[in-house]
Amino acid sequence: MNPYVLVILLSSLGLGTTLTFASSHWLLAWMGLEINTLAIIPLMAQQHHPRAVEATIKYFLTQATAAAMILFAATTNAWMMGEWDINNLSHPLASTLVIMALALKIGLAPLHFWLPEVLQGLSLTTGLILSTWQKLAPFALIIQVAPTIDPYLLSSLGLLSTLIGGWGGLNQVQLRKILAYSSIAHMGWMIIVLQFAPQLTLLALGTYIFMTTTAFLSFKMSSATKINTLSLAWAKTPTLMATTALALLSLGGLPPLTGFMPKWLILQELAKQELPLTATVMALMALLSLYFYLRLCYAMALTISPATINSMMPWRSSNTQSTLILALSTTITLGLLPITPAIMALIT
């Protein structure tokens, strides 16, 4: 892609998200979401491959549907209550429509069906943008409208997302689909605690972005898109595979890695709110996700491929990819747990 075009598209992505962050009016927020969607579509379709074009069309249709629902809900609220302000979403029909539309935007269950299919059709770099940056603008709106949403609806979305995110990833062999289900499960954790402690939602979103960035960039560095490719990667890049395995365990929420911090604090908050059953179900669903991360770690670090290849060794070619972002995100993914008290002091 032409570098000038790429700069314009990435700037538009930033502009769309910033516009939604800064808006207090539904029309401005909707405009930001639309700019975001339109800016990523050329990035998704740049491969000129039928699979990429199919993913782009699916993504466009779901995002357009969600945007139309948001506009309809905002118009309904303005018609019934005379308010266009985001914080004054007081009509129950409008608030329910908005949360379902935003759930469709970020891929929360039961509106998640598009996400694994779309992510599977994209390159790892575009998939990374879709899994991280594209979640920010809808989440800013979800956090603003959360006080007006029925708590039972939020809890149902959260529990269902963690269940489907864990269950759906169990039988997958494609890494991008596994990361899509991982995204659905993490979104569930963020939504479940939103009504009690929005700062924990932001903390979980931040750690999720760093962990997912590490996973995507690690797979990109080793050119892996399937589990069986990972099983051959240890001999080529043992250090990278070791850090990737730890990053995946961090995504699963194992101590003493960063991923344990948001899960621990969310379960603690649910227990404080006298919701022990919800906390228990969430913890059990986290075990489902942990199983498929462990599958990947087993394929990467605990299997040795047969050394019977007679062709030229691919790991002898020099790597020209930049590793700075990967190194920074890996450090954050693996080492933030000890400073949990400091982080809590900052966000509370």
Image (cartoon, rainbow, N blue to C red):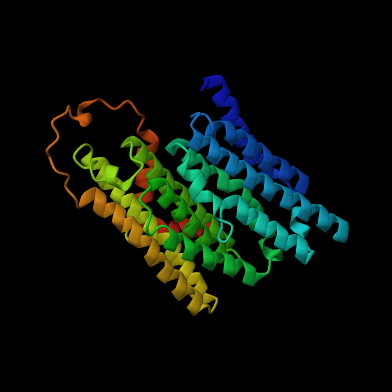
Looking at the rendered image, the quarter that the C terminus falls into is: bottom right
Q: Is residue 281 visible?
A: yes
Viewer-closest of 102 and 49: 49
| Residue drawn where x is 43% and y is 43% of the image | 213
Q: Can residue 85 be seen in this view?
A: no
Residue 215 sits in quarter: top left
Viewer-closest of 60 and 257: 60
Viewer-closest of 68 and 188: 68
Asked if residue 241 is positioned above or below residue 154 in the image, the reply reads above
Q: Position of residue 210 (x, y in %)?
A: 44, 47
Q: Is 165 left, or right, of 16 in this rendering?
A: left
Q: Position of residue 176 (x, y in %)?
A: 42, 46
Residue 309 sits in quarter: top left
| Residue drawn where x is 18% and y is 40% of the image | 235
Residue 29 sits in quarter: top right
Q: Position of residue 136 (x, y in %)?
A: 58, 47
Q: Is 101 left, or right, of 199 in this rendering?
A: right
- Which residue of the protein is positioned furthest toward the front in this rendering? 50
* Image mark count: 0
Viewer-closest of 236 and 142: 236
Asked if residue 54 is positioned above or below residue 100 in the image, the reply reads above
